[in-house]
Amino acid sequence: MLTRQQLYELYHSGFDRMLHFVEQLLSHLGDVERHVGHRQQYTIDRLLKDNGRLLKRVERLDARLLKQEMLNYQLTRRALGAVMVSTDDGFHVEARPQHLAGDL
């Protein structure tokens, strides 16, 4: 970073030196901008890849959870050996005959 005094001296050294300094400054800024752009794109690409991998994992876990919930439901129904019966007073549990207990 140039100090105020250095900028003043550069200004008084002539148009060509000042123009050369501005050109160098613009070139440096362009290099920094390209570097930042490449880093940002790399980060975006990496995060998209990670998100895709995590999405697939969540889908697999959702499928496993659904399967487990279905198994739990089946096992609970078998363990109870009963069915819900609708009556005028609401629902009540009615014992199932032994020969129908395995039909679930």
Image (cartoon, helix red, strand yellow):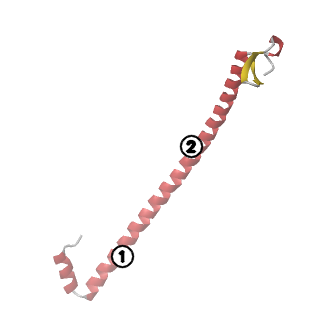
- Distance between the Cα atoms at labels 2 and 1? 42 Å
Of 57 and 72, nearer the camera is 72
- In this view, the residue farthest toward the left is 5
Tag 2: amino acid: Leu
Height in image: 31 above or below 93? below
Of 4 and 104, nearer the camera is 104
Tag 1: amino acid: Leu
- Disc ID at residue 96: none
Kindly identify the residue that appears in the image at 63 percent across and 37 percent down. Answer: 62
**Residue 36 picture quarter:** bottom left
- Number of numbered discs overlaid on the protein picture: 2
Circle nearer the N terminus (2, 1): 1
Neighbour tally class for label 1: few under 14, some 14-19, many 20 plus, Cα within 10 Å: few
Kindly identify the residue that appears in the image at 72 percent across and 18 percent down. Answer: 93
**Residue 54 picture quarter:** top right
Left or right, residue 1 beside residue 33 = left
**Image x and y of residue 64, in percent:** 65, 32
Q: Which residue is mark 2?
A: 54
- In this view, the residue farthest toward the bottom is 15
Left or right, residue 52 beside residue 44 = right
- In this view, the residue farthest toward the front is 88
Picture quarter with the C terminus: top right
**Residue 92 picture quarter:** top right
- In this view, the residue farthest toward the top is 98
**Image x and y of residue 49, in percent:** 56, 50
Of 51 and 79, nearer the camera is 79
- Disc ID at residue 26: 1
